[in-house]
Image (cartoon, rainbow, N blue to C red):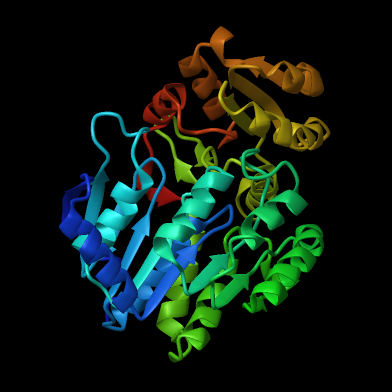
Amino acid sequence: MTLVIDNHIDTAYKIHRLSRHDIKRYRKNLSEAKYRILVSGSRGKSGLVEDIYSVLHGRELDVLGKVTGSKPKIFYRGVTYHIDRGPNPKRFFLDHENAGIIADFKSDIYCFENQTISKYTNGYIHFLFKPHIEIIPNLRLEHAELGESLEELAHTFGSTLKNVDYAIYAEPIIDNRDKVIPILRDYASKYGVELRIIDIPYSESMLPGVERVYILQELMDIMGLPPLTYYEYNEVINRIVWEIKPRVSTYGFYYVDLSKVNDPDTTSIALEYLKKNYVMDRPIYIIAYFRGDRIDRTKFFLPFFEKVRDDDSIERVILGGMYYDKVMKILGSKALEMKKLDMDSLFRDIANEDGFLILAVNGVTLDMDVVRGMLSPIPQQSL
């Protein structure tokens, strides 16, 4: 039984304009699929799609998984297809990518990551994909275009449940659940959707992403499949732990890249998990990068940095990017500016102090690519 994605076979899939025959195949393949599973929400979508694909593919079911983001991929029959969005990857048509994939790859089960950048993209993906099952692992403040409060986020996702048969919600943060669940229940009742709410044991809720294994168990039940085996369960847990496990840099200190997490709730959970399990008594350094086109995200992170300011285990916060004046004012003497530092010297100082480095807030930038290149992880060495 295969329990991991067979990514030893890699190839490319190029997005293309849809012909009349493509549209006909898309409609036929979509309607004939036994299950269309859409993974929505905020954090952990890509990882959950990979988990679902791995388990179902390992059980020899005909399944296609598709993840989005800066490195979109398709997982299909043991092959990983890297999606080529063309010369300008930030400008592509949702129907060319998503309907095109369904037209070109026939499968009994489609599991897609929702490209939830705005209310428009969320609604349009539902129109294209027509999911039977929608999974919302959690809702976190990240894109203001989706909602500037948890309640608004809940309305954004609840309003598109209209033609869904089942919805799964598995937020482990109690305060978030209390705000979101009543709204999702109202929409589920209005549209006749079976809403399954998963309770994560508190003892396990501090592992970032642990809801994925509980979601898989619920999904197996909805699909009428046996529960996860011992080996499947461990494979998923091991993948979750590996994703947040510290790597050793070429400078000799350990670090974790949380820069693609993008929301303060998950960053806080991950920070506490790392402090409890890995940091020990090492001084913590944070490199926080702020994007000019994500000012809303900077605003969402302000309460997080108030906590960082009062946390004695955090030695320094290095600020990079644009429009971080408010963060700098909050942090006071803890803040340093990346543009005024020699990063090589900084990393040598962290190594001399046996420090622990965390990358945070934004990761899809050239400056952070340079930082990651300097750290050059050595995968086989970790805490």
Task: Answer left or right for 312 relative to 216.
Answer: right
Above or below 13: residue 107: below
Task: Answer left or right for 72 relative to 19.
Answer: right
Measured from the top left, where is residue 275 in percent x and y?
67, 48
Name of the residue lying farthest toward the front: 20
In the rendered view of the protein, which quadrant contains the N terminus?
bottom left
Above or below 187: residue 360: above
Above or below 321: residue 43: below
Residue at the image position 56 percent from the left and 25 percent from the top: 293
The quarter holding residue 294 reads top right
The quarter holding residue 62 reads bottom left
Please name whichever residue, 140 or 251, is drawn nearer the observer in this view of the structure.
140
Residue at the image position 29 percent from the left and 81 percent from the top: 61
Above or below 291: residue 221: below
Measured from the top left, where is residue 297 in percent x and y?
65, 33
Q: Is residue 254 visible?
A: yes
Residue at the image position 74 percent from the left and 60 percent from the top: 173
Please name whichever residue, 342 or 354, is drawn nearer the observer in this view of the structure.
342
Q: Is residue 199 visible?
A: no
Please name whichever residue, 49 or 308, is drawn nearer the observer in this view of the structure.
49
Please name whichever residue, 58 or 117, is drawn nearer the observer in this view of the structure.
117
Residue at the image position 39 percent from the left and 77 percent from the top: 35
